[in-house]
Amino acid sequence: MRLGLQVGITKTQNRSLSDYLIGLAKQADQAGFSTLTVPDHFSLRPESTPWLRRDESSSIPAVTDFYEAWSVLAFIAARTSRIRLSTMVSGITMRYPAVLVKTADTLDALSNGRAYLGLGASPGFGADEHQRMGLPFPPAGERVTRLEEVLQMALQLWSGEDKPFEGKYYQLASTLGDPFYIQRPHPPILIAGQGNRMLRLMARYADVVSIGFAQNLDDMRAKLETLHKHCEDLNRPYEQIQKTTLMMAPTAHNGHLDPAVLNTFRALAELGIDEVMIGAPADPATFDLLATELLPAVEKIPVTGR
């Protein structure tokens, strides 16, 4: 099993984000964390971000602003050499799709083949964010349909074929070009989601999927079973798809992590989860424990089906 990091990129007081990211990324790269992901948002109201840690002694801001995700990933890529990089994930309503594909293509080239194209259908809680940024926010069903078009567009752009792309929502005059990416056949496609239509898209297009949260094993088991069925219907080997999930960083007590946390990782591995993305802790001492205690232990856990 692999261990990745989900890193927050919001404005925080009393620290330089650039210094924090440089230190964290270099430590994660050297320690052997497999992937570093960042959320792709611009600004969210507090009711949309219950997962964000906030200082109870200070007032809650009207909105939480995020640094632009792909710029942050490029900044990190320049200071690391091994760790893989992705958004978790980019909603397809946030940027024009062909530009987003070009952005991921460029990051893969500049990072020497370490980028994912992380995509999602844009979560429902983002409606306010879109309105304040002047971005259209179609209904959920349309967003999923648009996501499939974007996936088809990405594959055609990466193919370099000299022909138009003619979708219901997106049209390109030509997809002729010489993509920059290094990975073959293209940067891996990472899709996050959980609804039945999303799981079917994952079965058809994803190289990597992010499903649910580690705390709800029964829900995750059900979604993986649905994904497996869709793979069978599409005649695609289920084993071809790498599976990930998100998890809050374990807490430390008396200078050590609770050994019981490994039971959760073992249970996830039994479900076939290949990688767990844990939230990067704000406390440097806890990060050191993750790197020196948790990471080596997790890497020894076998994953069912691998």
Image (cartoon, rainbow, N blue to C red):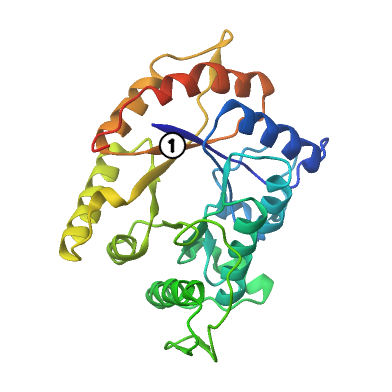
Residue 94 locus on image (x, y percent): 59, 69
Q: Nearer the viewer, residue 266 or 102?
A: 102
Residue 178 locus on image (x, y percent): 59, 74
Residue 262 locus on image (x, y percent): 38, 21
How many numbered marks, from 0 up?
Answer: 1
The quadrant in which the C terminus is found is: top left
**Point 52% across, 30% down: residue:** 249
Q: Is residue 216 above or below residue 121?
A: above
**Point 29% across, 44% down: residue:** 220
Q: Quadrant of residue 177?
A: bottom right
Q: Is residue 247 left or right of residue 36?
A: left
Q: Nearer the viewer, residue 227 or 114?
A: 114
Q: Is residue 126 left or right of residue 152?
A: right
Q: Is residue 132 left or right of residue 210?
A: right
Q: Is residue 96 visible?
A: no
Q: Is residue 204 visible?
A: yes
Q: Quadrant of residue 190?
A: bottom left
Q: Is residue 12 above or below residue 42?
A: above
Few, some or many residues within 10 Å of mark 1 (<14, 14–19, 20+): many
Residue 248 locus on image (x, y percent): 50, 34
The quadrant in which the N terminus is found is: top left
Furthest residue toward top = 254
Tag 1: amino acid? Val
Q: Is residue 206 above or below residue 77?
A: below
- Give the labeled residue for mark 1: 276
Identify the secondary structure beneath mark 1: strand
